Amino acid sequence: MTDLTKLTLAQARDGLRAKEFTAPELTEAYLGAIDAADALNAYVHKTPDIARRQAEFAQTRIRAGMSPDLCGIPLGIKDLFCTTGVPSQAASRILDGFKPPYDSTVTEQLHKQGAVMLGKLNMDEFAMGSSNETSCYGNAVNPWRREGDATPLTPGGSSGGSASAVAADLCAAATGTDTGGSIRQPAAFTGIVGIKPTYGRVSRWGIIAFASSLDQAGPMTKDVRDAAIMLRAMSGHDPKDSTSADLPVPDFEAMLTGDIRGKVIGIPREYRMEGMPQEIETLWHDGTAMLRDAGAEIRDISLPHTKYALPAYYVIAPAEASSNLARYDGVRFGRRAKLAQGDGITDMYEKTRAEGFGPEVQRRVMVGTYVLSAGYYDAYYNRARKVRALIKRDFDQVFAEGIDAILTPATPSSAFGLGEMANADPVQMYLNDVFTVTVNLAGLPGVAVPTGLDSKGLPLGLQLIGRPWEEGDLLNVAHSLERAAGFVAKPDRWW
């Protein structure tokens, strides 16, 4: 029998339905792979008993001929998603021991589809980071290595554990969340596909919040078809989430024709950043040629407010984080610090939050509190909100002029070494999000597709940005790009 963990989600689904193997057999293959890959630190809470129980139940549904697309498919779940009775602590010490008595809407929908949960995946603390180095569980490690170099690399962040697990075949697919690029950047760093859907397409209920107007869950998968299958399962209106859109969910997989003749692809001149590596420039040029050869019209466009996106994002996101994380005070939520005799309530708050939050979370909470404070609210937060409206208007205008999708780089580089940015200015780390934050600020769908390798043998990805609510068309363009690029490289197994 072929190595079942190498199958795509679609291949595993079809194999289960054809009775080529069973859901328990598929699950055991992944559980064995996970136990052999502790060096990657992708899984932080393994759930083999739950997985085996769910796989047995899924198999009864398959035998009865009642198997949705994800029935019997083993998935990894990012630690940001609440899961009943399983630790869900957003990679933070302050939520140590928290076992929710409920599931997030997304994980509940996946369970109803018959999906198998293999465990919870590593991430940056409260989803704040671009390298998975802020986790209380320690760093997740990229399964890729530079040619001739054993330096451990970042899988990206904040969904670093999800990206590492999918790239290393430790799950058929994984859930991720994207606040400023946290699905697309790690997908590009690890040679997989990741899509951030339109804001409101996927329910946020039961997902531990970072920045509520920017957070959006999405799938991280081995290819575009798998992303289409999983996105359909994750999407849908949720009355428990006031920002959830009451719109029908298309069959995204059925829309993958690969035919993009007549589509108009925009190339934004503002994304040609000063100092961008030649490899990224070449990749972008080659991707443009691939779409042109597939029959698309290529058009230069302008998104003039792009240069303000990163500063606006790093005002708005910390402001919302400051508000959302205020609940973790040792009284309502979170682990309470041990107090000395005579300590008052202020001491309790200070000690609890100082012990519970890591340096990056503390930094963003402080920045957010500052920009929301009296005297600075208008100067920073309100101004950033106005810039956000202008960024969204830029996209609205180019889409109104007939652009169907926009092609950009996904990241400014390939994966860097763990610890290499430790002494850098925090702003240097934030620049990893330079190509992705605009999509969150405008609430648009965006997908990262692996399209090549750099000179050191590491994967590089391109990003496609689509019209709101048109993820099906976006994924079809991504499918065409994926086929043209023919990216099939996998990391050499060293772990």
Image (spheres, rainbow, N blue to C red):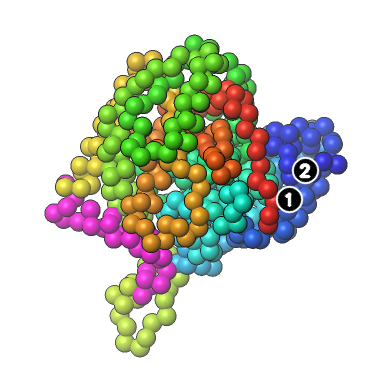
Instruction: Give the structural element (helix, strand or loop) at label 2.
Output: helix
Q: What element carries label 1?
A: helix
**Residue 458 falls in which quadrant of the image?**
top right
Quarter of the rendering occupied by the N terminus: top right
Q: How many marks?
A: 2
Q: Which residue is nearer to you in this view: 137 or 455?
A: 455
**Residue beneath the point at 30% across and 80% down:** 344
**Residue 4: image tag:** 2
Residue 165 lies, in percent from the top left, at 62, 49
Determine the residue positioned at 60% across, 19% down.
258
Q: Where is residue 13 in the image (x, y as percent from the top left)?
A: 73, 35
Q: Is residue 360 magenta?
A: yes
Residue tagged 1? 30
- Residue type at numbered disc 2: Leu
Q: In this view, which residue lies farthest toward the top?
A: 262
Find the distance from the CA under tag 1 to the CA under tag 2: 8 Å
Q: Main secondary structure of the magenta part?
A: helix
The magenta region covers 351-378
Where does residue 145 sit, x and y in percent of width and height? Answer: 60, 50
Can residue 418 be seen by looking at this rendering?
yes
Residue placed most toward the observer, 348 or 377? 377
Residue at the spot x=82%, y=41% of the render?
A: 2
